[in-house]
Amino acid sequence: MLGYLIAAPTVVAAARWGEEPAAAAVPTIAPTDLYDLSDLLTQAALPTAGLLAITVNPDGTASFALPRAEVGQGITTAVAMTIADEMDLPVDKVKVTLADARPELLFNQFTGGSNSMHSIYAPVRMAAAIARGRLLAAAARELNAAPSDLEVRDGVFTAPNGKTATFGSLATKAAASRTTLVRPRLKTRAQQRIVGTPQPRIDAHDIVTGRKQFAMDLDVPDALPTMLCRPPTINGRVVGVDNLAEVAAMPGITDVVIVEHNQFVPGGVAVRGKTFGQCIDAVRALKVRWGGGSVEGKSDGSVLADLKKAELPLTPALPLGKTIDERFTFHFRPGDPLETNCAVADVRADRAEIWSSLKAPIWAREQIALSLRLPLDKVTVHVTEGGGSFGRHLFCDAAFEAALVSKKLGKPVKLMWHRTDNFRQGRVHPFVISRVRVTHSAGSVLAFDQRHTGVATDFTQGIGELLTSMDTSLPGQNFLQFSETVFTLTANVPYNFGLVTQLLNEIYAFDTFNTSSVRNVYSPEVCTATELMVDRVAAAMGKDPMRFRLEFAKDDRMRAVIQKVASVGNWGRSMPAGTAQGLAIHSEYKGRSACLVEIDCRPQTVNRAIADAHTGPRVTKVVYAVDVGLPINPLGIQAQMMGGIMDGIAQALSYSLHLKHGHFLEGSWDDAFYTRQWNTPPELQVIVMPPTTGQPGGAGEFGVGTSMAAVACAYGRATGKTPTSFPINHDDPLEFVPYPTVPPIPDSPTDGLQKAKITRVRAKKKRAHTKKKTHSKKAH
Amino acid sequence: MPTHTFILNGKRVSVDVEDDVRLLWVLRDVLGVHGPKYCCGLGVCKACTSHINGQAFAPCSVPISDIRSTDRITTIEGLPATVGKDLHPMQQAWLDVDVAQCGYCQPGQIMAAVALVKDVQAQGRTVTDADLDQLRNVCRCGTYPRIREAIKAGAANMPALTVHRVKPKAKKHKHAVRKHTA
Ligand code: FES
Ligand code: FES
């Protein structure tokens, strides 16, 4: 492996991602002595464009612009740890920022499939090792000692005579005057002191003090709040506006403009104003005539019927054995992070600058350049920290909208979606049915057939770069190039089950519904359907579900996680009627996981009263074991699993969207029942298994499928009936009164003080004024 | 345009803004105080939670005209000063437990937690699981278990209050369960 020392005012070391360019024009000089870097000089002009570089600064810090999105998954912390470890710096001396869109990185600036750490670990270590090597050589000269006699700790070299030199003092002295190719020596696993140890997030202090900046917190001059009035049905088009001038004259409003539907944006009517509050009022006041949307008239039932028609046939039944055959239904689920879609854009006649949380920033930059008709190099795309993603930020809808609105107005905008828009027009996890048939005989499973049929998952962002995304919008290409591939690469049965066939079919075009690879793509359904059937087969064979899994699991890594949760979670303990344990396993991202849950489905629990809340069965305990190969930051991995578990609980029990007459009914977090404190398991334990492979696997979404399946299995065992429709409450009578669809967003409440039990008598005049503007949003 | 005056994080501020603009937007868009986050604007998610005279509330649901010149509004930015330290014990507990993931909900979570603990302390009790179950703040990253852990730890280090307000026992389930209303 080779990396580079870059000619720069301070020490800059870099590594290439993936393959070196074939037959590089660079003569490679095999280093004989790591510390005599002058021997490694090569010609100055090196193909350094696509490199990842670490800079050592005179203040003793090292900085690195990470070409990945940080959306809460802790990648900046894991990368800072990796660099700190390799360089012998304290973690807080490593400054990781998010890189702007860099098209020269091609496929390497894409945050998806939970693969960031897996792909970035090696090049980052290499660059860090080169920087350290360079500093070491300089320190040796400075301190008049052999490099091997120097001690390095926390950014300070110490010579045997006690003299010291800090990284900061050497940063400029050790700078390279020519760019050279270097073969670094990496630390061995035993020499690593930080990787594998629990480390708190590097941005934790900024977060708890409110200083962490998200796109909406940026102060871009004159970028005033901007919102879109969106259609009453999914992807409806603007036909006309009856009161544009009137709305433009409302208090605080500076602009109102129609945004036509095109290939980049669904369209709507944009309002810009002094405050978002006034934008909300303006959006509500607009009288827009709308055309039907892309799913006009569709409801849950009609989509389900279309899915059933598209289900691929099962392979002919084997002549031997008994079969168990079941179809599972998984309704639409929201893809909402806590931060709604937002972006800041400053588009001028000859240039554009965009800020947003983007997982595919190169693609975003290319698309924005296309939509604005600007050359690529006139478009700058900054990646901001994101308030969650869950697959949603693979697409950049807000950035496209902000860019177009800013261009139309010739003014900077800070564009934000309302929460209700996020639920109703945002990207969702597709509606899916999964049919499974298991054939077994005499204590073995002979065949496992799974037919997975879903509403198309939109993969047109490709892998984050125009070359791979170009063709995906052509008819059928989204499915052929991506859906099938992703399904084939992720769907698996982690058991020795004889003849296994898992096939996918998708219905509708990629843009009929607004979908994305929301939360673990296909795995939650594949895993849940599989694991529920495993419980059925185990029961048919008269075997304990845990013993059955141990017996049929494909490898020892899987058996180890099963045994772990079984012993820590006290599998098989006796529990009261109406409560039960459940167990599930899953293999993905080069890792293994097992989850044990305990659930309480007794009526007194299901019907416990919390104001304005969906309660339902409560998961009372979760024990989760995960083997990610090489855990970089166990504390961060535990956090990721915890998040996945909260998601899995919600997806199994309560969190979905109801489609009715072309629109979703849910409009707030009190309608869409994502896990809240009252449904949080009081007991939770995540066990990160010791390293097994030496390679960091993915962790971001690894908790979702396994925990969803375990909750489903526990529910089945507690109630004595396998659940087949998810979330389990979806077909119950609605527990909320849907907000109207016109106007598309609800009015802002005025009862904040009353709710806080603060009584105020408002001056009469003001009260009347506010009253008039306040619609009582939901009749109780 | 009317002028509104109040005390924000210990300092008196005056803003010219229409009466019905909700306080959240006055803080964020007019005064540039970005700690309180927008997430729903419906009084549901509690990401905007701040304190008014020491009590938790949702500024997205309060018109600026409801705020009096004597009201003390505290956002996450002003929380440490309420205990005269660089960090409030609850913020320290958040760091110790490494609660945050994306962090978007966390200013609101911390403000809600501090108010909850004060309430519970005023009742002469310690925080129970049932109290924690009442917290409405959404965390889409799913940090709930660590939030529970941090609140218990932070509460232990919060200065015992001079009780100036004993809250009447709230009838918690007054409008409970808006079920089956459709
Ligand atoms: S933004 Fe105030 S409660 Fe959601
Ligand atoms: S930490 Fe991301 S929403 Fe709570």
Image (cartoon, coloured by chain):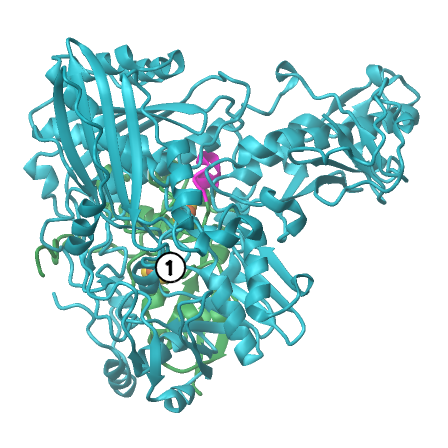
Chain colours: A cyan, B green
Give residue A426's position: percent from left, percent from top.
35, 59
Q: Is mark 1 within 8 Å of ligand 1?
A: yes
The C terminus of chain B is located in which quarter?
bottom left
Q: Is residue A352 left or right of residue A611?
A: right
Q: Nearer the viewer, residue B68 or A189?
A: A189
Is residue B99 inside the magenta stretch?
A: yes
Q: Is residue B20 visible?
A: no
- Which residue occupies the foreground of this view, B154 or A134? A134
* Residue extent of the magenta highlight: B92-101
| Residue A529: x %, y % from top left | 23, 32
| Residue pictured at 56% horizontal, 37% vertical | A77
In this view, the residue in front, A717 or B175, is A717
Instruction: Examine the structure image and report whether residue A429 is included in the region drawn in magenta.
Output: no
Label 1 marks which chain's residue? B
Quadrant (top left/top right/bottom left/bottom right) for the N terminus of chain B? bottom left
Residue A254 image position (x, y, % from top left): 48, 83
Residue A448 seen in render: yes
Residue at x-position 60% and y-position 25%:
A194
What main secondary structure does the magenta stretch of the protein show?
A: helix
Rendered image quadrant of residue A124: top right
Q: What residue is disc 1 on? A: B39
